[in-house]
Amino acid sequence: MTIDKTSPAPTPTPSGGSNTTGVRDTRGVRVFRWVNAIILTVVAAVTLYPFLNIVAESLSDEQFIRAGRVSLIPRGFNFDTYRLIAGDEAFWRSYANTVLYTVVATLIAITLTTMYAYVLSKHRLKGRGLLIGIAVFTMFFNGGLIPNYVLISGLGLKNTIWAVVLPNALSIFNLLVMKAFFEALPKELEEAAAVDGLNTYGTLWRIVLPLSKPVLATMILFYAVANWNSWFTAFLYLDKADMFPVTVYLRNMIAGATSATSVGAGSGDLAQISANIKSVTMVLTVLPIVLVYPFIQRFFVSGVMLGAVKQ
Amino acid sequence: MRSIFKRAVAAAVAGGLALSLVACGSSSDTATTSVEDLSKAASMDGYTVDEQFKATEPVSFSILYSDHPNYPLKDDWLLWSQLKDRTNVTLEPTVVPMSDYESKRSLLIGAGDAPLIIPKTYPGQEQPFVASGTILPVSDYLDLMPNFKDKVAKWKLEPELDTLRQDDGKFYVLPGLHEEVWQDYTIAFRTDELERLGLQAPQTWDDLYTVLKAIKAANPDSYPLSDRFKGNSLLTILAQSYGTSAGWGLPGHLTTWDPETKQFVFTGSSDEYKGMVEYLNKLVAEGLLDPESFTQDDDTAIQKFANGKSFAISANAQNVVNDLRPAIADIPGATVAKIRVPAGPAGDVLATSRLENGLMISSKALENPNFVALLQFVDWLWYSDDGAEFAKWGVQPTTFTKDAAGTRTLNADITFAGINAGAPKHLQKDFGFSGGNFAYGGTTDLLQSMFTPEELEFQDAMADKQQTELPPPHPFNADEQEQATLIETPLKDSMNSATLQFVLGQRDLSTWDAYVAELNGKGASSYVDMVNEAYERFQQNHS
């Protein structure tokens, strides 16, 4: 298959009747660009709107939110709720927990995944099929909720950080992506390293990993986002409020109100959380992970595609 | 290679089985012990009504704790330290976020890891755990709970307790007890609009129709009633005055007791239910009830109320203060208030029970050396007048004072539920009192002690309502329960979706008979037979 190298990558220039090469685009291409730009703009708007709406609400006066009059522009602009949350001990305590759990869990996960994937990428390994089988088995079957719970508490992990960071330490999907990436690396590089006297660990550490930055960055991002957002393991295995991650705190705030009204609970015990507090908490919770994306994106785009196709 | 894999799989499966057996093993050894043989360590001899319970030595009990987002648990609450001082008991809470309390409760009970005390359990929610034997049949041990027995006798709560009985004649949940029926949810109206149009607050559902029609005439672009709670509150209060049940009030067994024929009938196919559906259909057809009432979320409904697009909405006392008043603050002269729950064809009745959410006790409490002390403690904190006042109001003089006439006053620096608005401290957040795990039920005096004058007036107006006859106990045995679990959900789903179609006019009411036939095709009639058999069996065995 040949690719026409003269036309550049289609940048969305809706106004463009011509492009930088001076070759005039066909009518079809121009129509395509317009349609493309419009569709993508709509998709972007639909995706961004809820987020911007929450940001606007977090800066608005409660009065306007209740009346449903805040869309993209804050009304009754104020920082009061941010100030209020800044003084909320429970929120920051859970926030610190989330940071700790995410960092530790991501470190453990990326270490385990890299080592497992590297081993699996070596076809000469004895028992490789079994190792893959064990991994893939867990994608289709699991022990179920209660046996898992009994296991974790039997191991004495309940109410420790390990109950949060260990149970889902290895994502098999990520493992397989990474294995495919390692398999695609030129074998000759490793052979050369072996000739120069590096053992297996040296090869992995000095040759393979430096070449694997895109996939590592992608995996770290996958794991970090998953861990940052996860609440279920913490909810299952932690019984102390001062160990909860911020997601459990946030979920209780937002879903607590709904579950109380669904059973018609006595009015004294209904959750009444103001819309401002909800939106400020949401903004502060998603902010760090949203901010990470732009910095890691250049790895992300190349990393996730690498290893997807075997030559 | 393949055989190794197979063996590994077999080993894993065997391991999993062994684990789940361990999980179930601890539940079956709950032999009945006579009260004399029970473990009495730290308990009080001759503990009786209105006596302060104090364990004779320090003890601690584990408790499941539903953590409320409005007042997250704090270890330094006065509640904990005072409880220790008064009763010598330290509670060890397993903290569960309120949002997912029920899931975690099932998990812990299923895994055999539940704390001794399991609060916030609504009557009926204990059902799934009964067969496994993990929950204590508390009705066997009521002799250890003098305050509970006293309240049941004084307030004649026996018939209500009977509704909790299982097939073995015992009950497994200690419910919250109210002295009198108490209805909080009703419909709130824009009273300024009623006044402007010269209308009276409706007394019956027919009045309500007339009032809504007049509002519609004056505001043709509006839906006078646009409801929240997915219509569940409206359905509940409407159904009871039609002599049937719907919405939140629909019982798990989907049947209604007919006192005349002494039989249960299927709720969704009864004539009373049809009457209710016809009424709602009329409201929707004439544009008086927003068709979105049954699907929109609460915020949307409140926004319509706030923007003057609707003039009535379901509400409880707190909703009026926290949601509705702030929402209409921008409309000049707008006021809102709850109306007395309207009367209907079945009379001026309330179908509310005097039981509310309560607590379960784990069976493993029987093995606890402090078993008797545990029940005495539960009896004092949840069922004695002192315990209930302590849980609700706190401690004199730190949080409140009580004058000679018995009127309680919250201290000026503490705020709660609209009392002392703006005060620096909060009764729930800073002291732990009036929390949902400990404070509910009790005497009418205590219940109303924190009501606003407006709410007191509403309760006064509601006081002369008649309570409808309670359905007699009709508990399923294990086999029936299994069958019922399979059939109930599809029946309920088709009943609810057909109800909505009839109400919204998407299905013509002339097809009612076809709808009843559909229900029977899905097993409604055999289901009702099963309920009636269970009722008769219970009558024979336990009366």
Image (cartoon, coloured by chain):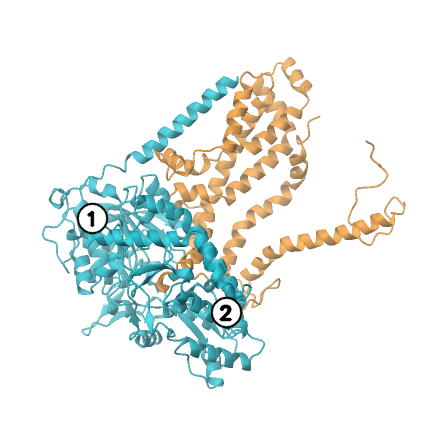
Chain colours: A orange, B cyan
- Provide the secondary structure element on which disc 2 rests: helix
Marked residue chain, label 1: B
Residue B486 percent coordinates (x, y): 41, 46
Q: Is residue B478 left or right of residue A278?
A: left
Q: Is residue B385 left or right of residue B126?
A: left
Name the amino acid, label 2. Asn
In terms of depth relative to the viewer, which is nearer, B468 or B33?
A: B468
Q: Residue at x 26, y 54 (%)?
A: B536
Q: Can you say which quadrant of the picture contains the N terminus of chain A?
A: top right
- Regarding residue A254, the answer to whether it shows in the image is no
Marked residue chain, label 2: B
Q: Is residue B16 left or right of residue A208?
A: left
Q: Can you say which quadrant of the picture contains the C terminus of chain A?
A: top right
Residue B329 percent coordinates (x, y): 49, 75
State the residue lying farthest toward the left. Answer: B46
The disc label shown at residue B281, or none:
2
When asked about the image quadrant of residue B445, the answer is: bottom left
Above or below residue B336? Residue B471 is above
The disc label shown at residue B374, or none:
1
State the residue lying farthest toward the right. Answer: A23
Within-10-Å neighbours for mark 2: few <14, some 14–19, many 20+: many
Name the amino acid, label 1. Leu
Within-10-Å neighbours for mark 1: few <14, some 14–19, many 20+: many
Label located before the other in sequence (2 or 1): 2
- Regarding residue B212, the answer to whether it shows in the image is yes
Q: Residue at x 57, y 26 (%)?
A: A117
Above or below residue A255? Residue B4 is above
Q: CA distance from mark 2 to mark 1?
A: 53 Å
In terms of depth relative to the viewer, which is nearer, B263 or A309?
A: B263
Query: Which of pointers 2 and 1 indicates the residue nearer the eye?
Result: 2
